[in-house]
Image: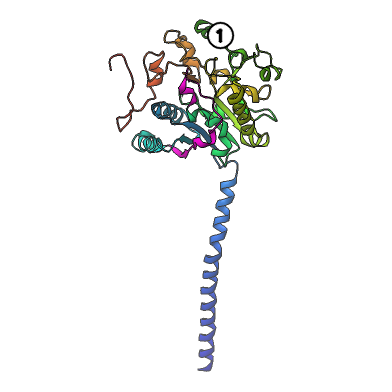
Amino acid sequence: MALLKKINQILLLLLVLTVCAILYNKVHQVPLALRNETVDLESPGEVEEEIPVVICAAAGRMGAAVAAISSIYSNTEANVLFYIIGLKTTIPHIRKWIENSKLKEIKFKIVEFNPMVLKGKIRQDASRPELLQPLNFVRFYLPLLIQKHEKVIYLDDDVIVQGDIQELYDTKLAPGHAAAFSDDCDLPSTHEMVRSVGMQNTYMGFLDYRKQAIRDLGISPSTCSFNPGVIVANMTEWKHQRITKQLEKWMQRNVEENLYSSTLGGGVATSPMLIVFHGKYSSINPMWHIRHLGWSPDARYSEQFLQEAKLLHWNGRYKPWDYPSVHTDLWENWFIPDPSGKFKLTRPDS
């Protein structure tokens, strides 16, 4: 009887030990599983890099932002995160447009831009008031709006993208360069367009060389300009070089000395960038920024050239959602009608 009791006690002890071992394994397997998952997530071969793309959604032209986003999303398999920048009054409209259309599948963040940062920094100019809109200056403040990314793409809203945005994101920036742009002298095809519409593509067209402050820069007026409607930016270098502060300095000087204005070729957002980035930027593949489509209601590129282009930009007065304009069919391929009906295309028969 005593022997039987002892055997039962041993069996009971073994059972307790077995149960404890099972519980111990279950408790300690959870952190192990999490550690394994974390390792997998951080493995370069497993993670798909996020591509941040910044686009503004301005009142009266939100259809432009929607078409740009639609074209990017439709032509890539990359992991794109759209940063849509708006003013407080416009944000509800663009959010509703996205969430109630086929764009509801995109990854996006809406960021409010506070125009008070521009107070006292913009010289009033009645000749082209649209160029003075606050969102035109979002590109100056990229590190303040986009916090967690090393590399960022900024696009004007009046573009469509026909190539894979991954290719643009992979643009190499030279050491010490905070940004890459497209030169205005880079393609013979665009030279013909520039000549036909009488547009400037040198610093002379953007800065007033009668002013001593401009002459003191030592930049030849015949230097080729660049277009900041498409930017690939290195946020670390941008912050290190205090690019935003430099741009604000020249905005302030323009208010005081009228160094550039929208009556010149490029408007008030391009000129300070030409000064700050002179000789200190990398180049974007020219096919990734075919521009001047909005400079004339008549001058057109060849259809073959446009089919080969990776990105089309309707910079200028003649926008593809208005009338008259050129190559509107290419733009309308990507336009998504406004579910609220507020934004409407202007067409000859409308």
Left/right of residue 337 with respect to residue 175 in the rendered view: left
> Which is nearer the eye, 164 or 334?
334
Q: Quadrant of residue 97?
A: top left
- Residue identified by numbered label 1: 191
Does residue 264 lie above or below 59 as drawn? Answer: above
**Residue 260 image offset from top left, x and y in percent:** 58, 19
Q: Hey, which quadrant is residue 318 in on the image? A: top left
Q: Position of residue 126 (x, y in %)?
A: 47, 20
Q: 10 Å neighbourhood of mark 1: few (<14), some, or many (≥20)?
A: some
269 in relation to 84, above or below: above
Residue appearing at x 67%, y 29% in the figure = 177
The quadrant holding residue 210 is top right
Q: 298 or 11: nearer the eye?
A: 298
Magenta-drawn stretch contains 159? no
Question: Which amino acid, mark 1?
Answer: His
> Is there any visible trace of residue 162 in the rendered image?
no
How many marks on residues?
Answer: 1
- Secondary structure beneath disc 1? helix
> Which is more toward the observer, 16 or 262?
262
**Residue at 55% in and 76% down:** 17
Percent coordinates x, y for residue 104 in the rendering? 38, 37
Residue 154 visible to an observer of this rendering: yes
Q: Is residue 107 magenta?
A: yes
Residue placed furthest toward the bottom? 1
State the residue lying farthest toward the left: 349
State the residue in front, 114 or 288: 114
Colour approach in the figure? rainbow
What span is in magenta?
106-132
Q: Where is the C terminus found, in terms of image quarters?
A: top left
